[in-house]
Every structure is written in C-alpha cells, then in structure tokens.
C-alpha cells in the first residue's frame, strides 16, 4: 500500500520541523533522480532473485543465515541494555551524543543492580539481551558483571551479545567477555578505519563474531574488497543498516553531499543502494559471508511493534484487542440506550463472556472485536480509536498507567497513550474492516482499498507497511 500524497506531505512537514532552518541545507533529489534510483533498486532486487530470502514484510534481506541475535530481534524477543552513554569513538554517523556514562538503561528504565535487570528479562520473557552503549568496553567491569549475572541465571535459555567499536579490544578483554558467557560480539569497524586488527582478538574466543556497520556510500568499493577478507579472518555475519540523519550528526553528514530521503525520519538514499549492491556483489562472487540488510522500515516498524505488544498485555482491557501493528484497538458503539440495552441482553442470552463488553453511560457501549459481527449497524454507530503502551521509570500522571513490580525493590510503569484520532465508520467501512481483520490469512488483502474509503491513518494503526521505503 503506497503512501498517499497527504501522508508524504505529513512526513515532509515532520522532517522540516525536526531540522528547522537547517532543513534548507539538505539535498533531496528531484523526481527524475528518484525514479532512476528506484529503478536501480528494483534491478538489484531482480538480479538477487531467489538467491536471497526476503522477510519481515519485505523489509529485511537476506534472511537465509541471520545471526542468532538477529533472529531473536525478528521474533521480538530481544532486550537492548545501554550499559553506558559514553563513547571513545568519533563516527560521523553516530545519531546521538555519547558523553555521559550514566546508568544501565533500556526503554527509559534504569537498572543499578543486575539482579533487577534479570527480573525484568524474566518478567517480559526475553530470550536475548544485548549490551550496548556508548561503548561497553569503557565500563568493562560493569559490562562483564551484567553478562555474567544474566548467563548465570538463564544459562543457555538466553543469548547475549555485545556491541563495540573495538578501539579498546584486546585478546585478554575478549577472554574476560567469553568467560562471563558472552555468545556474540558485534564490531563497528567503521570506527577504526575498517581495520581487521581489533576484531581478530575475538575470533576463536567468542563463539560468534559479527560486523555491524552502516552502509556508507563512499566506502562501497572498499567494502566489496573487504567481504572475502572478513570471511577469511573468521567473521560469521555482516549486518548493514541505512544511514539516518539526526540533529546531532547533521553537520558531519551534510558536508558529505548525500542525497537524502523524506520519511518518518530523514535517511540517506545511496546508503540503501550501497547495502543492496554489497549483497548482490557477495552473491555474484560466491562470497560465503552472510549479509543482512537491516532497513530503516524494519528497525522503525518491527522493533517498535515488539515493544508495543509486550507492554500492551499489562494494560489491555478485556473488551479491547491488539492490532497486527501492536496497537490497542478500542471499539465503541454509540446509539440509543434502548438499542444498546437490547444488544446487552442478546449477548448474555448467546452466552458471551460478560468481560467482552463494558457499558459507559446510557448511550456508549464498549465491545470486543469478536462481538462486531453480531451488530446491525443500520441504527447504531461505531467509533474506533487506538492506544500505545510504553514503559516508564515512573508516571507523569498525564495518562492512565499500571504499576508493575519487577522485583521486591523495583517497579516500573506501563503507560497508555491514546491517539487523538477517532474514526467514525460507515456500515460499508465496518464490513470491509471485518473482512480483512477477521479473515485468517487475509490481513494484507487490501487491494480493494480504492473502493472503500478507510482512513489511511487508521490503516497505519492496524497494519505494518510492506516493503522497503518509498523514495520521495
């Protein structure tokens, strides 16, 4: 489902707002250049053909041989702990300031004690945990302590990996990490001038060695030459992701004369093409190193989806349901009190569980999705709205929330944030929505959208968009 002109305009407006006066310094290609770039992308995908496996609604490739950590990310079973917020690198593409050590944090929740983080992992059912930063090797003792505690508690039931720029890497440090139980280490070799020297300390010591870097357009040819070298020196996976512009890295990025793309965030056009070209080069030259392109749509959609689903279970009401995109869906019948009362009687006589509805005043009845087919909308209205569930260290008391105990001495808050959008649907829209939502295997059969005027914003709450990002 392509973005509408209104949606594109909304994203463009958001991009302008994020960068304010500096937005005018960005170079966005004209329509001809965008069409040429999109054709290049399609040609690469065509050349790749069946040699790669494309998954996650067309947002991730190659899925054939992902690292164990990446597989857990795809399954939504991964927690990323930012062990510190300080880095000793100077990567031009770094999206945020990295100048304070801080406390180990995930999803805005801080952990002073590794035991509390273990309780957190257990509560949410995570099967993977990563140690990130900043630079985790700057606080090596803390990183080792958390890794050892996690592995001691969960053993083989959890997979643990660590991100590093490798600047401080030594054989002894790698042995300490391995001794703590680290399963995988990921090097950003862009921070060390694409040197192999640092990651070689980990080969043969830590079970899985991965290189994870942004796809930098001007390093395309260098990376093509490096692919066989990476494989030969013991790297098992190469993860590439798309360069993204932020207010923090703006000055370092803009001087490189990149072609930028509009979207939920501003990204670099040729970064994606570089990633796809490297993937194609590897396949054509029979290079055995598995390459995974982690696109911006994948990171933006699937990682947020997993968080919404996990959190929603703590605040989802019995008459609400979750959308495919992980939002809480609330259905509200609005009509004459007598008509609503008749439905209540009918539900009870039919033996439906009374938790599937909730009367709110004389003319408002909340109902579960399962009751929708039993409603005649000739004389009653339906309003649909959506909420997101977020983790917080504590509540600001602006939104409804539930307090969740992590351990005997620590609690967090799951907060509900309801979208201001309210959708009043016609009987035709309701019928179409039911046919899509409630028909198994039909969640993406949206070809008939042109004939049913469902609000685009509503569809974004219901579904994730397929495919790589549109170029505009």
Image (spheres, grey):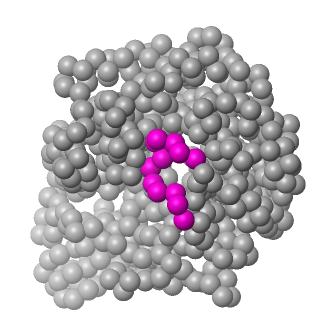
**For this view, does 469 lie left or right of residue 428?**
right
- Frontmost residue, 26 versus 423: 26
Instruction: Give above or below for 36 relative to 211.
Output: above
- Frontmost residue, 26 versus 325: 26
- Frontmost residue, 369 versus 145: 145
* Relative image position of residue 425 (x, y in whole percent): 17, 60
Residue drawn at the location 32% of the way across and 83% of the way down: 398
Instruction: Give above or below for 389 relative to 68.
Output: below
In the displayed image of the protein, which residue is found farthest to the top? 285
The image quarter containing residue 287 is top right
* Relative image position of residue 274 (x, y in whole percent): 46, 24
Residue drawn at the location 79% of the way across and 40% of the way down: 202
Residue drawn at the location 60% of the way across and 32% of the way down: 193
Instruction: Give above or below for 91 relative to 332.
Output: above
Residue 156 forms part of the magenta stretch? no
Let me know if residue 119 appears in the view: no
Residue 96 forms part of the magenta stretch? yes
Residue drawn at the location 38% of the way across and 62% of the way down: 327
Quarter of the image that includes the N terminus: top left
For the record, the magenta segment spans 89-100
* Relative image position of residue 293 (x, y in whole percent): 52, 33
Q: Please identify the dominant SS of the magenta region.
A: loop
Instruction: Give above or below for 184 relative to 241.
Output: below
Quarter of the image that includes the C terminus: top left
Counting the numbered discs, the total is 0
Let me know if residue 299 appears in the view: yes
* Relative image position of residue 435 (x, y in whole percent): 31, 49
The image quarter containing residue 366 is bottom left
């Amino acid at each position: 489902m392509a973005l509408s002109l209104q949606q594109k305009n909304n994203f463009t407006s958001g991009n302008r707002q994020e960068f304010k006066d500096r937005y005018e310094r960005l170079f966005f290609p004209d329509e001809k250049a965008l069409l040429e770039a999109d054709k290049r992308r399609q040609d690469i995908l065509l050349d790749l053909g069946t040699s790669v496996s494309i998954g996650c609604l067309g947002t991730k490739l190659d899925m054939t041989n992902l690292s164990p950590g990446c597989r857990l990310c795809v399954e939504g079973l991964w927690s990323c702990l930012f062990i510190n917020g300080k880095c000793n690198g100077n990567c031009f593409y770094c999206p945020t300031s990295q100048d304070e050590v801080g406390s180990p944090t995930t999803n805005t929740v801080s952990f002073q004690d590794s035991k509390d983080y273990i309780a957190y992992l257990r509560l949410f059912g995570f099967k993977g945990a990563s140690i990130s930063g900043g630079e985790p090797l700057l606080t090596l003792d803390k990183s080792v302590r958390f890794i050892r505690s996690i592995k001691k508690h969960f053993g083989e039931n959890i997979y643990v990996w660590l991100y590093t720029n490798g600047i401080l890497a030594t054989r002894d440090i790698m042995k300490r990490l391995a001794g703590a139980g680290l399963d995988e280490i990921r090097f950003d070799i862009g921070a060390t001038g694409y040197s192999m020297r640092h990651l070689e300390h980990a080969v043969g010591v830590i079970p899985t060695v991965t290189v994870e870097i942004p796809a930098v357009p001007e390093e395309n040819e260098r990376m093509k030459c490096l692919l066989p070298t990476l494989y030969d020196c013991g790297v098992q996976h190469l993860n590439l992701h798309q360069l993204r512009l932020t207010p923090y890295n703006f000055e370092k990025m803009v001087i490189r004369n990149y072609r930028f793309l509009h979207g939920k965030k501003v990204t670099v056009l040729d970064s994606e093409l570089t990633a796809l070209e490297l993937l194609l080069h590897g396949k054509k030259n029979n290079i055995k190193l598995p390459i995974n392109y982690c696109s911006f749509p994948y990171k933006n959609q699937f990682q947020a989806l997993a968080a919404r689903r996990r959190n929603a279970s703590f605040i989802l009401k019995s008459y609400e349901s979750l959308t495919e995109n992980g939002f809480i869906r609330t259905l509200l019948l609005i009509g004459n009190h007598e008509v609503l009362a008749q439905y209540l009687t009918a539900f009870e006589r039919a033996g439906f569980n009374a938790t599937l509805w909730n009367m709110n005043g004389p003319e408002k009845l909340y109902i579960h999705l399962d009751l929708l087919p039993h409603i005649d909308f000739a004389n009653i209205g339906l309003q649909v709205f959506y909420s997101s569930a977020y983790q917080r260290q504590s509540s600001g008391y602006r939104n409804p929330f539930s307090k969740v105990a992590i351990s005997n001495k620590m609690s967090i808050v799951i907060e509900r944030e309801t979208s201001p959008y309210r959708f009043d649907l016609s009987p035709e829209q309701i019928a179409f929505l039911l046919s899509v939502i409630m028909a198994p295997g039909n969640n993406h059969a949206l070809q008939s959208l042109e004939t049913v005027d469902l609000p685009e914003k509503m569809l974004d709450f219901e579904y994730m968009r397929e495919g790589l990002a549109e170029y505009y």
